[in-house]
Amino acid sequence: MAEPSKFTPELNTAELTDFVKEVFPQAKSLQWSIRKISNGSITVVMNIDEKHLRPGGTISGPTMFALADVSAYLVILAHIGKVALAVTTSLNINFLAKPPLANLVAECRLIKLGKRLAVCEVHINSVENNQLVAQATATYSIPPRN
């Protein structure tokens, strides 16, 4: 994994949250909040409730996938600035454990941040027991800057 300290954020938590609310208000329906932005990483919390469950009483795969995707989007924007049209080109997720009905925390780190592509790794943990429940890698396409 790349050394996170070589990536410096351009946006703080408030700036990033406000920007995403402005350009992508639908994303807030995922019930996420940014806990921390650091050099090369971000921590995102997702509030979980009954609507996130699947049969069997566990958090659904699409919920964890959405958290991985939004975390990647947020860490990239935090480090490149206000570039709303960065888009997912691939996302691979491994579901590792059955999470209980509890909030999730995503720790997302930049692996590569180039001019046209960004690659991230996401670890999703349950706040109830701090168990790693999913791991994902995401690649985003960054539009050319003028």
Image (tube, rainbow, N blue to C red):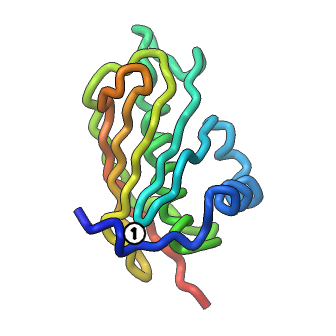
Q: Position of residue 83 (x, y in %)?
A: 61, 72
Three-letter amino acid code at the position of disc 1:
Ala
Residue at 76%, 58% in the rendered image: 22
Q: Position of residue 33 (x, y in %)?
A: 61, 42
Residue at 54%, 22% in the rendered image: 52
Residue sitting farthest toward the right: 22
What crowding class fits label 1: few (fewer than 14 Cα within 10 Å), some (14-19), or many (20 or more)?
many
Q: Position of residue 17 (x, y in %)?
A: 67, 54
Return the residue nearer the eye: 40 or 100. 40
The image quadrant where one finds the N terminus is bottom left
Residue sitting farthest toward the left: 1
Compared to 109, does 122 lie above or below? above
Return the residue nearer the eye: 67 or 16. 16
Residue at 26%, 67% in the rendered image: 2
Q: Quadrant of residue 5?
A: bottom left
Residue at 55%, 45% in the rendered image: 35
Q: Quadrant of residue 126?
A: top left
The image quadrant where one finds the C terminus is bottom right
Compared to 140, does 125 lie above or below? above
Return the residue nearer the eye: 20 or 2. 2
Q: Is residue 61 left or right of residue 112?
A: right
Tally of numbered discs: 1
Compared to 11, does 52 lie above or below? above
Q: Position of residue 81 (x, y in %)?
A: 59, 73
Residue sitting farthest toward the top: 56
Badge 1 marks a residue whose secondary structure is: strand
> Which residue is label 1 attached to?
118
Compared to 144, does 130 lie above or below? above
